[in-house]
Image (cartoon, grey):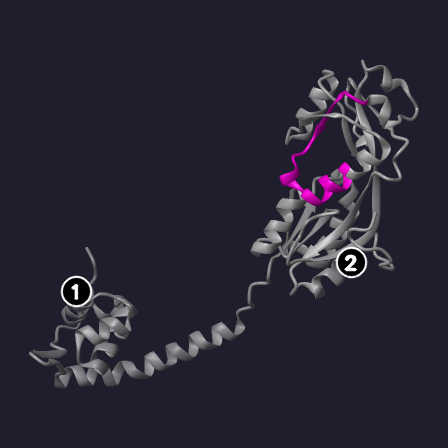
Amino acid sequence: MTDSSPTFLDLRLLRYFAVVAEENNLHSAAKRLFMSQPPLSRHIKRFEEILGITLFVRHTRGLSLTEDGAKVLEVIRPFLKLQDRTFAQLQALTKPLAKVVAIGFTTAFEQGVFSETEKRLRVVYGERLRVRRTTSPKLAQDVRKGKLDAAFVALPLDAPGLTITPLRYAETLVAALSTHWPEAAKKSLPLQAVNGKPLFWFQRKSNSAFFDHTKSIFAYVGYEPVFVEEPAEYDVLLARIAAGEGMGLLPASFAAITREGVAFVPVMEAELLQIRLGIVTSSAGTALAEELYKNSPWGGPRHFQANAF
């Protein structure tokens, strides 16, 4: 059974009563309290029942305080003012939530490459750091949409409207071949030696800048592969390479991963086939780009352009 004595009064009723008393109109009071009129009317009736007195005289133009209602208002006003001051002081003591810093890491490189950078960033940002790992084009898209504050991406990359800060880190591409292919036994592989063989490769729409860059190099060195659509998952890609369905050209850091049936062989055109690392931010993220640049192991003189290879 609910106790109806003032000792067990719902403090919200005091606020509701005070607002109705100030407005002298249930509709106006309900609007001010961001609630509908029927429940407000029930709350006032409940307050009257608890106190055992009539607070308002109801008439066609609205409400008027009774003599008892005026006395109640006089009693509760100091309390409501104290409540407001208390809440204001508590709000002043409340620490604002620290802004989450969302950083992306491209899966174009083996993730161990970023271990030192991520370690440094966790020292700087602590629990505020949020990390996303996916392809460079998706990371750039997330930065553009405001889902990420910045991202470490592979270059070259189409990123219109975004700012790219190149880093002093690059990897050459190596050939990932089935150990059953005779070319897997070579110490260094000229790409022309695997002309006409299937190459797992991404579609141009995924990253047109890098696609066009590598296509021009393939043409320059006379490499003519048969393109096969690259699986999205790295494990699936290596499994299909091991099965002899095709070869891959991957950043050298992936060669640190041992996979039965797959051999990683340097290519003679390695200096031409490089993938570089950079930071992408929105135009408003210059300060963050500088901070990430300083906290990465690869900061230094920016002597090359993002698309200069």
Distance Cα–Cα, label 2 vs label 1: 60 Å
In the image, 96: left or right of 47? Answer: right
Q: Quick one: 43 or 216, which is closer to the camera?
A: 216
Q: Position of residue 289 (x, y in %)?
A: 72, 60
Is 132 in front, or is 213?
A: 213
Residue located 66% across and 25% down the image: 236
Q: Which residue is mark 2?
A: 293
Residue 131, visible in the rendered structure: no
> Which image quadrant for residue 225?
top right
Location of mark 1 (residue):
38
Q: Position of residue 94 (x, y in %)?
A: 53, 69
In the image, residue 292 above or below residue 223: below
Label 2 sits on a secondary structure element that is helix
Of residues 82 and 303, the one drawn nearer to the viewer in this rendering:
303
Q: Identify the residue shown where x is 10% and y is 81%.
A: 61
Along the horizontal axis of the image, is 153 left or right of 265?
A: left
| Residue 204 is a magenta residue | yes
* Residue 272: percent from left, percent from top: 86, 40
- Around disc 1, counting alpha carbons within 10 Å, would you say few (fewer than 14), some (14 to 19), or many (20 or more)? few
Which range of residues does the magenta coloring cover? 195-215
Name the secondary structure under disc 1: helix
> What's the amino acid at mark 2?
Tyr
Let me know if residue 59 is in the magenta part: no
Instruction: Look at the image and tell me whether residue 168 can be seen.
Output: yes
Which residue of the protein is positioned furthest toward the left in this rendering?
A: 60
- Marks counted in the figure total 2
Taking the spot 85% from the left edge, 25% from the top edge, the residue there is: 192
Q: Position of residue 109 (x, y in %)?
A: 75, 39
